[in-house]
Amino acid sequence: MTARTDAQLAFLAEADALKTVHRATTLHDGSRSENSAEHSWHVALHALILADHAGPGVSIDRVIRMLLLHDIVEIDAGDTPIHGQHDTAEQEAREQAAADRLFGLLPADQGAELRALWEEFEASESPDAVFAKSIDRVQPALSNLHSGGHSWREYDVTLAQLEQRVGTKVARGAPALWTRVREMIAPWFTAHGK
C-alpha cells in the first residue's frame, strides 16, 4: 500500500503546478489572470450549480470529475486561449505527452481510469462530456462579461466568433443556458461595435 499511496501523493504534488498556469481570462474583477487550477474549480462549481441544464442521463458527479481533470495537462502543455492562434496538431501532441506523464505518475489502475475520463472529455461525444464541454466554454464567457470583456478586447473577438467558438459548444450541451448567456453578453458586443 505504501507504493500506491506514494504514487498518489506524487501526482497530487505535481498537480499543484496547475496553479502556476495563467489563462487569458481574468478574475471577474479584472485584477489578474485566472490560473488553470482556479478555472478547474470554478467550472466544476458551475456544473454543480447549473446541473438542471444538463440533458437526460447526464451524471453530474462524472461531469465534475471530468472538469477537475480537464486542464491537468496544461501543467506541461500550457493553456491555449480559445481566441488565440495556435497549431492544433502541435497542441494536441503536447497534451497527449503531458497526459502520458501526469496520469503515469498514478498507480496504473487509477491512472488508466482518470486518463479515460480525460480522453472522454476531450472527445466530447458522451452526454457527460458534451455537458462538461458546455460548462467549460460558458465559464470564461461569463468571466469576460464581468471583467468588462478583458480577453475579448485583447483578442479582438466579435460576437460571430464567440458564437462559433463558444456558443455552438455551450448550446450543444445546454441550449437554454446558452440562450440566456447570449442575451447577457450580446449588449457588450453591440456597445463595442463587434
Image (cartoon, helix red, strand yellow):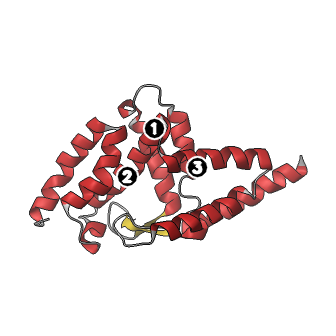
> Looking at the rendering, in which quadrant would you find the C terminus?
bottom left
Above or below for 97 versus 118: below
Q: Name the residue under label 2.
A: 137
The first of marks 3 and 2 along the sequence is 3
State which mark lies toward you, 3 or 2.
Answer: 3
> Residue placed farthest to the front in the image?
89
- Image coordinates of residue 90 in percent, x first then y, are 52, 70
Left or right: residue 102 compared with residue 194: right
Distance, label 1 to label 2, CA atoms, is 15 Å
- Three-letter amino acid code of the residue under disc 3: Trp
Vertical side of 74 occupied by 175: above or below = above
Q: Which of marks 1 and 2 is nearer the N terminus?
A: 1
Residue 45 lies, with reference to residue 149, above or below; the image says: above
Foreground: 29 or 125?
125
Circle 2 sits in a helix, a strand or a loop, which is it? Answer: helix
Q: Which residue is drawn at 47% across and 30% down?
A: 58
